[in-house]
């Protein structure tokens, strides 16, 4: 996941590859003081010309002492994987074979997907030594991005002349979903459900149908779990313990159509859905279940067959990193048909989407209904915070009254659509983007504990 380190020797850049340093122009400016005595005696003009000539000779000598770009080897080193909305340190290291101390100012050609401005840093390289500088990027979009060349401006300690160079460190990097947030959500929610962390959260006793062991009856245990044969042998109440069934299949179905392009705060609804889905995938894989992914718009964007283990989490993560919002309406029926064809056995389908505001029943409702006969469907609609705020606002005039009424009608209709899905056997809920991850994980754990799957 960590972008690989790239290196290259610098080469001349620009029309001439060199220029004047700031100190050169400062000294030329100092020479202008001779203009005052020139008004008294024009012979002082020769003194000004002599000063300028000395400065120019000093610049030429400094330029000769500057090493050629080929003596500089440049490296780009990434300190951590790139993930959405997370700061990452990037190090630029330069090795010099020159005998002079160099003062380097560089600019890295970082695309807008990674940062709102190019990466910049400056540092000093000792003679025949190595030094480095760092800058920070904060990715704003998932997926692949191209990082370009590194441009250098370097000077000696005289600072009269400078050379321009560029190192071809062009590389393709991948921005992943917010890994730390998904991991934090998963760990917090699993702890709150009292998963056995010392056993790597592999099982949860007291729920499910798979027999695990026997123990002495405790107050609060279900009477139906009492083992009467063991009770008769020991002369005291003994209860059966069960563990959650493993190797069940969980499908994460993501709508990537135009409705998921809506931004809430600084992220799109799809970004929130991916972060929540990643948290759910971590929990499900750690409990021994098989996790699959289906992301779709007008066509199937990404499909990962359900498997178990940490390697599967990596595959799901790689696929989620490249999922993008589509400008067109999603084909929900095609996605449902593909899932029914690929998954014959009963599974849990976690479908994350949004509802279009149309007079007719949205296609996604009909598509999800076709899955209910075979699968347990958790249908999650991402809500719009400003819509709920508008619905509870007190109108101050006629225009605001119509806005409040429209918002209330939209919310009421969305609830009716979700209620229709519940009547057909689906678990249908609407959640705000910030509450999406806790909702998915808690719903999944509840399904496991109640053995609904």
Image (cartoon, rainbow, N blue to C red):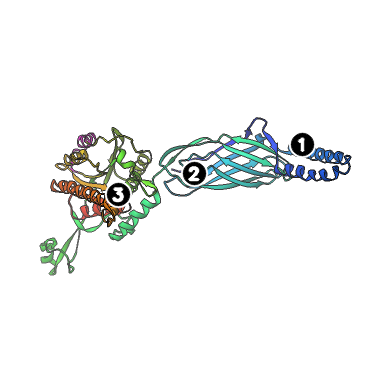
Which label belongs to residue 384? 3
Nearer to us of marks 3 and 1 is 3
Is disc 2 placed on a helix, strand or loop? Answer: loop
145 to the left or right of 157: left
Q: Is residue 172 magenta?
A: no
Label 3 element class: loop
Q: Residue at x 66, y 35 (%)?
A: 69
228 and 151: which is toward the camera: 151
Q: Main secondary structure of the magenta part?
A: helix
Percent across and percent down for residue 392 are: 26, 56
Q: Is 201 left or right of 109, judged from the image as shown?
A: left
Q: Is residue 345 magenta?
A: yes
The answer to whether 434 is drawn above or below residue 227 in the figure is above
Q: CA distance from mark 3 to mark 1?
A: 65 Å
- The part of the chain drawn in magenta is 333-346
Residue corresponding to mark 1: 60
Q: Give the foreground label among 2 and 3.
A: 3
- Residue on which disc 2 sits: 116
Give left or right: position of 132 versus 86: right
Q: CA distance from mark 2 to mark 1?
A: 38 Å
Q: Which numbered disc, 2 or 3, marks the residue that appears first in the sequence?
A: 2
């Amino acid at each position: 996941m960590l972008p690989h380190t790239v290196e290259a020797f610098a080469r001349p850049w620009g029309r001439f590859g060199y220029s004047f340093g700031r100190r050169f122009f400062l000294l030329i400016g100092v020479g202008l003081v001779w203009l005052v005595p020139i008004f008294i005696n024009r012979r002082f003009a020769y003194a000004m010309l002599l000063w300028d000539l000395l400065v120019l000779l000093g610049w030429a000598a400094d330029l000769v002492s500057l090493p050629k770009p080929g003596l500089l080897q440049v490296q780009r080193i990434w300190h951590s994987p790139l993930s959405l909305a997370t700061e990452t340190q990037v190090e630029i290291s330069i090795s010099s074979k020159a005998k002079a101390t160099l003062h380097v100012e560089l600019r890295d050609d970082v695309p807008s997907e990674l940062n709102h401005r190019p990466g910049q840093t400056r540092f000093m390289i000792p003679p025949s030594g190595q030094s480095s500088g760092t800058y920070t990027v904060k990715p704003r979009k998932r997926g692949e991005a191209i990082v370009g060349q590194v441009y250098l401006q370097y000077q000696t300690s005289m600072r009269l002349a400078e050379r321009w160079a560029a190192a071809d460190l062009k590389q393709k990097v991948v921005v992943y979903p917010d890994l730390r947030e998904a991991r934090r959500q998963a760990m917090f929610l699993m702890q709150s459900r009292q998963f056995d962390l010392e056993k790597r959260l592999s099982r949860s006793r007291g729920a499910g149908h798979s027999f695990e062991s026997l123990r002495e009856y405790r107050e609060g245990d279900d009477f139906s779990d009492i083992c009467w044969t063991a009770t008769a042998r020991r002369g005291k109440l003994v209860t059966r313990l069960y563990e959650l069934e493993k190797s069940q299949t969980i499908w994460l179905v993501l709508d990537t159509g135009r409705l998921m392009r809506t931004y809430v705060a600084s992220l799109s609804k799809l970004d929130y859905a991916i972060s929540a889905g990643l948290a759910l995938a971590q929990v499900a894989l750690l409990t021994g279940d098989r996790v699959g992914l289906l992301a779709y718009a007008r066509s199937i964007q990404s499909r990962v067959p359900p498997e178990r283990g940490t390697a599967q989490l990596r595959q799901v993560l790689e696929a989620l990193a490249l999922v993008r919002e589509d400008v067109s309406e999603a084909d929900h029926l095609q996605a449902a048909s593909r899932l029914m064809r690929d998954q014959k056995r009963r599974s849990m389908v976690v479908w994350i989407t949004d509802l279009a505001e149309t007079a007719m029943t949205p296609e996604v409702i009909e598509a999800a209904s076709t899955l209910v006969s075979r699968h347990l469907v958790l249908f999650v609609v991402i809500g719009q915070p400003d819509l709920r705020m508008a619905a509870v606002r007190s109108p101050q005039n006629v225009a605001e009254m119509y806005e409040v009424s429209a918002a209330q009608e939209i919310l009421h209709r969305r609830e009716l659509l979700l209620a229709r899905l519940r009547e057909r056997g689906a678990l249908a809920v609407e959640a705000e983007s910030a509450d999406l991850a806790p909702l998915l994980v808690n719903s999944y754990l509840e399904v496991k504990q109640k053995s609904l799957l």
